[in-house]
Image (cartoon, rainbow, N blue to C red):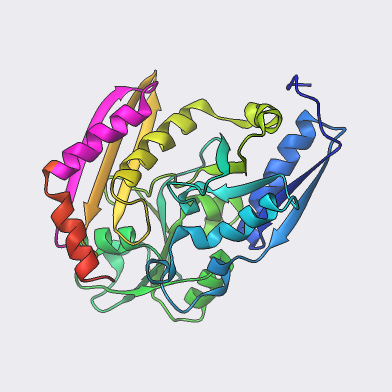
Amino acid sequence: MVSKSPVPSKLIIASRESRLAMWQAEHVRARLLALYPDCAVEILGMTTRGDQILDRTLSKVGGKGLFVKELEVAMAEGHADLAVHSLKDVPMDLPEGFELATVLEREDPRDAFVSNDYASLDALPAGAVLGTSSLRRQALIAARYPHLVIQPLRGNLDTRLGKLDRGEYAAIILAAAGLKRLGLPQRIRALIEPEQSLPAPGQGAMAIEIPAGRPELQALLAPLNHTATAQAVTAERTVSRTFGGSCQIPLAAFATVEDGVMRLRAMVATPDGKRIATAEASGTADAPEALGRQVAEALQAQDAAAILAACAINPA
């Protein structure tokens, strides 16, 4: 056994019921069973408010917390011990009584261009309809491709692909990680490098949330933690927290770690992509929050506050 804490007879994982969310929960379940074969690990599938509201953008109906609240209620009421999330869906500040215990190794953090008819963003003709759920992607694409028509795209991954296949969009932008995890890499026509589309904070990473004050559970989950990923996403989320940490603003932050050195890049923009501030810095990976604050300050020095104020005045 890896953990010195007593291993419980059963653990229950709370998860959204989308195919990707269930894949993530099953992945964590398999990892836990490999570590603790005598523990029964079960999955409690749930539908969240974020899954139910599909006719409006997240920025207009409450943001990231819509995907995690029901799972937190299940933990608070004792129906589940932990919840598995896509980290980019987790609010920067968790409700009192909860904490992130573990960050798993990151999958591909890049955005993916998906289309049945076109090979890349560059190939899309003027007036083509491009779907995205993200103000960050909307801003970055609008800045480079002002001739495209960008429309909101909600729903789980299968729903979004279905809308593309029905011809509602010429192309859509999705996270590469989700497509790869579900065995759909063939749907990716092109990967968009961070230099063209800087990822969202935590994109491609999975996190495990637990009730606070459960050190024995923290110890059980510790072997799943991936240090370099945890350091990177801490820096990214520090930038996001500085600017309000919601999906209501176009914000990107992406860190990489190599030989103990972290490079962090970040961006804030107006939804139309006409005003963008970018910053980057490098530092020791052991101090990710300090690096996050440094990059956030660099963005603030570029009048990020005015850019974000414009977002509030003219929401997407």
The quarter of the displayed image where residue 262 is located? top left
**Highlighted magenta segment, given as a residue range:** 272-300
Q: Judge left or right: residue 8 versus residue 242.
A: right
- Residue at 35% of width from left, 30% of height from top? 289
Looking at the image, is 244 positioned above or below residue 255?
A: below
Residue 60 lies, with reference to residue 29, above or below; the image says: below
What quarter of the picture does the C terminus occupy?
Answer: bottom left
- Residue 22 in view, yes or no: no
Position in image of residue 277 (x %, y %): 17, 49
Q: Residue at x 25, y 73 (%)?
A: 148
Percent x, y of residue 102: 58, 35
- Tell me how many marks there are: 0
Residue 16, compared with residue 205, is above or below; it is below
- Whether residue 198 is in magenta: the answer is no
Q: Which part of the image, by quadrant, shows the N terminus? A: top right
- Whether residue 41 appears in this view of the structure is yes
Residue 86 placed where, x, y %?
54, 50
Residue 232, quarter of the rendered image: top left
User: At 55% from the left edge and 44% from the top edge, which residue is drawn?
Assistant: 206
| Image coords of residue 285 (percent x, y) | 38, 23
Q: Residue at x 62, y 47 (%)?
A: 84
Asked whether, in this view, residue 286 is left or right of residue 207, the answer is left
In this rendering, position of residue 224 left or right of residue 266: right
Q: Which of the pair 241/146 is nearer the observer?
A: 241
In this view, the residue in front, 118 or 225, is 225
